[in-house]
Amino acid sequence: MADASFDVVVIGGGHQGLIAANYMAKNGYTVGLFEQRRELGGGACTEPRPASGFRGNPCAHIAGLYANPCNQDFKLHERGLSYIFPRVNSSMVFPDGRCIVSYRSMTWDKETGLMTPQPEMVEKNVKEVERISPKDAEVLSTFAAGKVWQWGFAAMAVLFNPPALPGEIDPVEDLVNDPNSGLQRRHQFMTCTEFVSDFFESNELRAHSLRMLGSQGIYPDDVAPLTLYLITVPMQILGQGGGVYVGGTHNVTHALQRALSEEGGKFFVGADVDEILVKNGRACGIKLADGTEIEAKKMVITSIVIQQTLARHLRNVDLGPQGAEWRRKIAKLRVDRGQIFWGHFALHEAPKYTAEAWNPDCSQGRWIFMGDADIEYMDREYRFRNQHIRPGQWPERLYLWEGTDTKWDPSYAPPGKHVSLLEEMAFPASWRTEKEWMQIKKEAPDHFLKEWQKYAPNMTWDNVIATNIDTPWDIMHRSDNFLEGNWGLIPGLPSQWGAMRPIPEFAQYQIPGIEDFWMASGSCHFSLGLAGYAAYCCYKRMAQKLNLWKPWEGRMY
Amino acid sequence: MTNYKYDFVIIGGGPNGLCVAAYLSKAGQKVVVLERYFEVGGGLATEEVTLGGFYHNTHCIYHMMVDYAPPYTDLELEKYRCKYIYPDLQVTMPFSDGKALCLYKDVDRSCDSIAKFSAKDAKAYREIFHKFKLFMDEFLAPGTYVKPLPTLEAVVGMEKTEIGRELSEYQHKSPREIVYELFENERVRTLMLYLSCHWGLEYDNGGLGFLVPLMLNRAVNSRLCLGGSHRLSNSLSRVIQEPGQGHLRGSVRIKRIMVENGTAKGVELEDGTVYEAEKAVVSSIDTHQTFLQYVGEKHLSKDFVEKVKNWHWEKWSLCSLHVALEEPPNFAAAAGNKDINKGLMYVMGYETPDDVIHHFQAIEKGELTSNVAFNCAFPTVHDPTQAPKGRHTASMFEMAPYNLKGGAEKWWDRKVREVHEEAVLATLRKYAPNLTKDKV
């Protein structure tokens, strides 16, 4: 006899679990959601940091969820989730005082989710490029208007749809096959450096692109899935991309939780799920670590990373003749990309960039990238040197990005003060000992500041009130879902992408042989950036199979 | 702009705002709680402010009088996963000579500990323990959970019984007078004086002396919220939301409380959104903001405005330090009494009553003492879920001036913060020597 019973049991209360739970509640099911941690949210979290009175988002920070139709499906804007979209999407500042500024060229309507391109802003961006590289500007002016938009929309279609089944259209395949798309099959096998070198003529634009790709969890010498290039180039040129979560990323969690509660869904925190109960080939409930059993009358949905699902939750379940092979493949998934140093700096005054003389708007970027345009170094040394960071051993150059949200949302700091976030690429948590991480964490602010000063001379220790650097070690300890401190659960490398993610057998959000079990987990769909792709796409497959509500009919995705 | 209609609009989502909303929601009312911070809970905060996986209760940690407070049972909070740990050893004051004064839930054990310093004080403690318990049950606890009576009525009520008359005798005395009359031993006085004052009483002020019994009684009635203090907020949130008519809204900025003809009609936000209140607007935030900022003087009588303006804030606040630890504390005093490593609240840095008094005097001058003293807790010793396996947290809460000499802005000085952090940790190490720098 179970201790409690729901139609649908959801494991994990991060944004994926919450989105999945909300869709099920909308269909009239009773829903119980179980979260291991002290609060819901997973990576959608905000903490007072680096000092009380200041806010920081220790995980996801760029407001990427806006593109997800769940905003409209659950009316999240009425439940406390709002976005600010800064006028400047990104800028890259160079040591010589020049910069590239990319203005946002897309508007977004919160009621409908419609995105509307603004061609005049694209022209403005091309003019900015012209100041750095007339050649690139020429390419872009003939190319940007049509093709880059096409790329961006294809990428969105990939991200917000389940991997194509036989007979379904794969938007990227389509693009590659289209002789006018500017893309060829060879692009699928290029490293980031090869791709950006093929596309841009100047090292400045290449560097800008490479650093943006870094934020997708890949290094310049990695081969990335074509879709990631299709996301990045439009972000760079068209200024498409995420904004600011008003009040903090954790508002995503609260808005989703309120929507769920208001539909009658129940959630439980500090509820550590230990096992998924499978009987006669169907998932029929869960067992918590404290022994409580929860019945799932219709289905179990998990949003947990696949390695944990198999190694913990399904450890006692016989997965059939191929089970051992699946377990072997899952245990060998790569987790060595997508780790980040994430540094919050509480400041007396906002950073002032030398490049403001070139274009004052550079300091208004949602993303401000800092770096030289030394492509050879980025390609050959960047990953190598970052992955070798040890106590007392830091690379001479860093490629930071900075975001100072207090420029747009003063609630992130006490009146008159600022808080900036810095990002640099890191490596898996297990590559260093705990002691080493503690030392690295202690040393990082000084190295970050030294690099920052090269571009923003007011960034001295005198301007700093407090700092806090989250390392992969911290992220790993925040949640069991972030294996090795990986933000995207498993990195989006080509072998772990689309219909191959996490392994081809599980790519449609189910495990063959277990009925009524669904995986709305970032392991099953690219998941860097808190955009809820996995839960949304998993629900799409569920709706098809179970004939549920299909709000996407009549809209783009 | 959007208009929403509710029966009740509640301003502020701290424990008070949530509690009133929970009662209203349970009573079938349509309520909305408007909170400026990105999440509700106010002081019921549990955050990861040091390292990943280490939970810190950055504001409130000791939940007192849980057994007296009606909301826990009325709202069936336990059903909503709000559970408490009630450690046997409630308060420990370690001294630099390796001895320690311990107050337990069990009065006999407290008296045994006090008797090691003074048999007379142990006897006195036993007496006041029982007497203060009566004060609590008869007056202070009921007085806490009923509407305030007019002063005269309250006085008349107190004078009606012997217990009441006895309690009112404390009224005009200062905490120092009460503690010095009751206890003779320097160390016992040190602990009792601190416990009497650290919730806001001034050591030498008369007039609120009847609160000393409350403070000393509840000193051994503290519990830890399992999973962190925020769990209580979480449970209250569920009580509000689960009936389906209660809504929480965070990150909202209020512009004004809408008043028409002497009636509060609703709340308007800075972005123009209006929350209409069919029945009432309830404010759980301070009087200055509620009346002067949001209601507006034009809707209030001159006399009332004057009273609000005369409201005084406490002279001090708390400076807190939260640290992640590699191992649990091992107190020097634990050599003589193993229990000491399993306490809830530790008061450290004070060796004599004068240390406590000097601390208050320094605060008056806007100074931090070089010999830092504070109360401190290690919640993970009792609730391992609040840190990664085998690891621990500590929170030190030190009385400190809000207006530091040179201005409150001084608190933003990184060097001031760093130097002070070192001083706090030095005190901690003095009593728990295993917590060396590399363990923090």
Image (cartoon, helix red, strand yellow):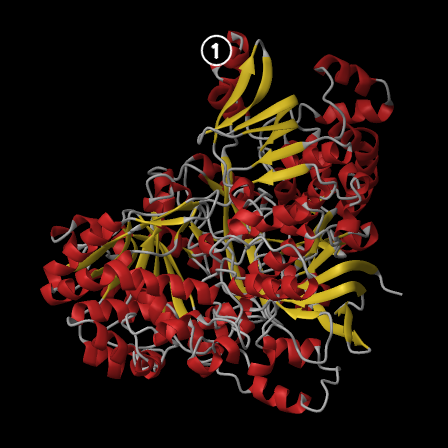
- Work out whether residue B296 or residue B174 is closer to the camera in this orientation and state it: B296
Q: Residue at x 45, y 52 (%)?
A: A66
- Work out whether residue A506 or residue B361 is closer to the camera in this orientation and state it: A506
- Residue B42 in view: yes
Say which quarter of the image contains residue A142.
Answer: bottom left
- Furthest-right residue in view? A1
Percent position of residue B324, x then y: 53, 64
Query: Which residue is identified by label 1?
Result: B298
Q: Residue at x 29, y 56 (%)?
A: A239
Percent position of residue B351, x then y: 57, 51
- Work out whether residue A444 or residue B335 is closer to the camera in this orientation and state it: A444
Percent position of residue B298, x then y: 48, 11
Q: Chain of mark 1?
A: B
Q: Would you place residue A85 above or below residue A387 in this image?
A: above
* In the image: residue B365, left or right of residue A202: right
Q: Would you place residue A550 above or below residue A534 in this image?
A: above
